[in-house]
Amino acid sequence: MKSGIIITLPGYDPVTTYLSAFSKEIIGQAESIGLPVTKIAGKNVDVENVSNSLSSFPYSLFVFNGHGDEKTLFGHQGCPVIEESKNDSLLYGRITYSRACDSASSLGKNTASKDPQSCFIGYDLPFWLYHDITWETNPSKDKTAEIFFNTSNLIPLSLLKGNTSREAHEKSQKAHLKAISKALRNKDKESKVIAEALWNNYFAQVLLGNENARV
Amino acid sequence: MSSEKDNREGTKIKDSIKELVITRIDAQVPSNLRLSIGMSATGLTKEQMIEHVQRGDSIGKRIIEAHLRFIKAQVSGQLTSALVSAEE
């Protein structure tokens, strides 16, 4: 694998629009250090484009933004793009960060167990995200959603800084705890539900496979 | 007989847990927030979260589990220990 990043940027509903909007920082950092970035955006997030990109570009980091379940990552309009025991070998040899519900519970385990070089960081329960509808047309201004992306973006951002997959996972976990602590000290009405959702993400986030992988 | 009692008690506990979670959602979730969980495309309103919990469907169960996980972490000291460790 070569140092580089492949990232999905769907945007067919408010949730996927948020995932993509808050991925700009990841792309910006990768480009600032001169890493090649392959962006698969909008309606192009389908099985053909994702498969072609993963086959054609041997880049060491795959960041998946989108919906998911235990065995599948879904692209534009909910079309399956990576399915367990079907095309998940496309993830072999890479670090995959999957910001999608449940995908670590089976797909991630399967990938990590079949290839010792692979690393899968994701969630074995739903990924929780609260957003404020006031900012749906301008997600990057949403301070509530930002809390969830500051903590999760730290995984790819740490990897891009040269940290191992273990270090990136742990930095994100620590950031979750600090954000929970801050939320619990806050007196805003929504602070408790934000702390609770962050705790869920902290609890659900797992590192599977190669702990020493680097981008 | 005892299994019937167990079932009744189980149902009662489930209802009381639902009530607890609904009360928490009602008190803590502002109307301007939407929760993204699972395949929810637009995010759930507070009212939709409460409906899922009342129905006890798969999303409702996920919401209940998360609330209970957080409550247990608070009560057991797991949350405090984790938060202290992050400050070290």
Image (cartoon, rainbow, N blue to C red):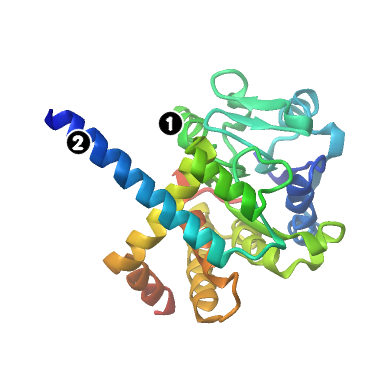
Identify which residue, A7 or A66, lies in the foreground: A66
Marking on residue B6:
2
> How far apart in space, not on screen, are marks 1 and 2 (Cα)?
40 Å
Relative to A35, say whether A62 is above or below.
above
Marking on residue A142:
none
- Residue type highlighted by circle 2: Asp
SS assignment at label 2: helix
Marking on residue A113:
1
Identify which residue, A34 or B88, lies in the foreground: B88
Residue at 79% x, 41% y: name it: A10
Circle 1 residues within 10 Å: few <14, some 14–19, many ≥20:
some
- Residue type highlighted by circle 1: Ser
Whether residue A58 can be seen here: yes
Residue at 54% x, 66% y: name it: B27
Residue B83 x, y percent position in the rendering: 40, 73
Q: Dividing the image into 4 quarters, which one contains the N terminus of chain A?
A: top right
Relative to A148, say whether A70 is above or below.
above
Residue B41 x, y percent position in the rendering: 72, 41
Identify which residue, B18 or A30, lies in the foreground: B18
Q: Output the chain of dot 1.
A: A
Residue at 60% x, 58% y: name it: A152
